[in-house]
Image (cartoon, rainbow, N blue to C red):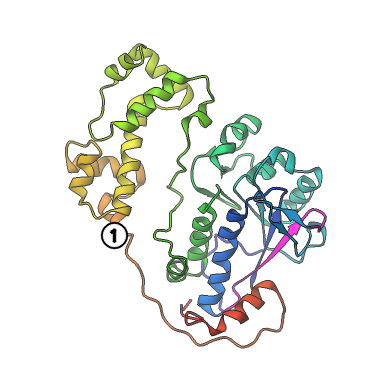
Amino acid sequence: MSQFSQGAQPQNRVAQSIGFLLLDNFTLISLASAVEPLRMANQLSGKELFRWHTLTHDGLPVCASDGLQITPDAAMQSAPALDVVIVCGGVDIQHSVKREHVSWLQLQARQGRLLGAVCTGSWALAKAGLLDGYDCSVHWECLASMQEAFPRAAITTRLFSIDRNRHTSSGGTAPMDMMLHLIGQQHGRELAAGISEMFIYERIRNEQDHQRVPLKHMLGSNQPKLQEIVALMEANLEEPIDLDELACFVDISRRQLERLFQKYLHCSPSRYYLKLRLIRARQLLKQTSMSIIEVASVCGFVSTPHFSKCYREYFGIPPRDERAGQQGNNLVVLLPIPEHQVSSSAVLALNRAQGESTFASVRI
């Protein structure tokens, strides 16, 4: 069974078949963010690298959260041969997952398929017991409820998570980052960069990028003092506030402050504060032309060497390598492919794209 996480495949390999299981009230932007990179991968390579199929539990049309109705290609029980199944969730996910979904997903797991999810689709995998012991991502709005309902799943705030044969993503445009990452792993960085350029997508985010999760969705409404402290931290990254002062501001002791962070955020206050400053530094390195010295200064580091040391320890690479990684790639032109014999949505899209100037513009 082929998997996204494998390296580059032989030129004559069969197109990878991906089924998108659409739950009631799924978010259309997450589905599009996952499918469109596949279409563009075919267009830029001039090959049918991927084919995709939309599925519902009964084969009947399903409404997205914006009210648009999608007619699926098939019912999940009569789906064509698949390599990958990705669950597309959205609004009111707890009531959208049916017993039939759970049974079918468990069958796909037993048959060795790679399983994934976008937006709140991770809930369906977790309900089927298929995320026990796996790192997984979900839209931040569903974060607290999933942590409570499925304690055996390691739910993270990352934009997307790739853990063995489970690939999960949060919502919005995050599925595009996950798919670009996987396409790059399988077919090369040039292709992923080319797709990003076609979608005017300035930066491909990676697994180290996190969702901006409102703290109230992580803690609930029972910890106003902790929320206030974090808000103060976020507002004072350039000149960090001493922890004793922070405690004084919200009228608690330093010891109470440390207990709150350990109990609810699972780290010390100083460690959490440092994480906020480093995440901000990473954004500045990737999104601005500020020098490393300037970035260190505006993120509250007294010296560049200290900043570099902390950055390397947290992200695994020094700041200069982070910035160097943003450089682009050149594209290489290839000739178009012969006509396909098999009809599918992917083939039809590929045939329509043959008149585009970008067709077969990336060598893989």
Question: Tag 1, which secondary structure?
Answer: helix
Q: Quadrant of residue 55?
A: bottom right
**Residue that sits furthest to the front in the current view:** 67
What residue sits 65% from the left and 43% below the top? 91
Residue 276 vs 263, above or below: the answer is: below
Which residue is depicted at the point 38% across and 17% down? 257
Which stretch appears magenta? 47-60
Asked if one can make out residue 12 in the rendered structure from this viewpoint, the answer is no
Asked if residue 336 lies left or right of residue 289, the reply is: right
Quick check: is 257 in the magenta stretch? no
Above-or-below relation of 259 to 218: above
Residue 88 at x, y percent in the picture? 65, 52
Say which amino acid is labelled 1.
Answer: Ala
Residue 363 x %, y %:
46, 79
Asked if residue 54 lies in the magenta stretch, the reply is yes
Q: Quadrant of residue 97?
A: top right
Residue 45 relative to residue 21: left or right: left
Of residues 6 and 352, the one drawn nearer to the viewer in this rendering? 352
Viewer-proximal residue, 200 or 52? 200
Residue 361 seen in the figure: yes
The quarter of the picture where residue 313 lies is top left
Query: The N terminus lies in which quarter of the figure?
Result: bottom right
**Looking at the image, is 193 positioned above or below residue 204?**
below
Q: Residues within 10 Å of mark 1 (few under 14, many from 20)?
A: few
Give residue 76's position: percent from left, percent from top. 78, 57
Q: How many marks?
A: 1
Which residue corresponds to mark 1?
324
- Residue in the picture at 32% in, 40% down: 278
Picture coordinates of residue 215 (x, y %)? Answer: 47, 31
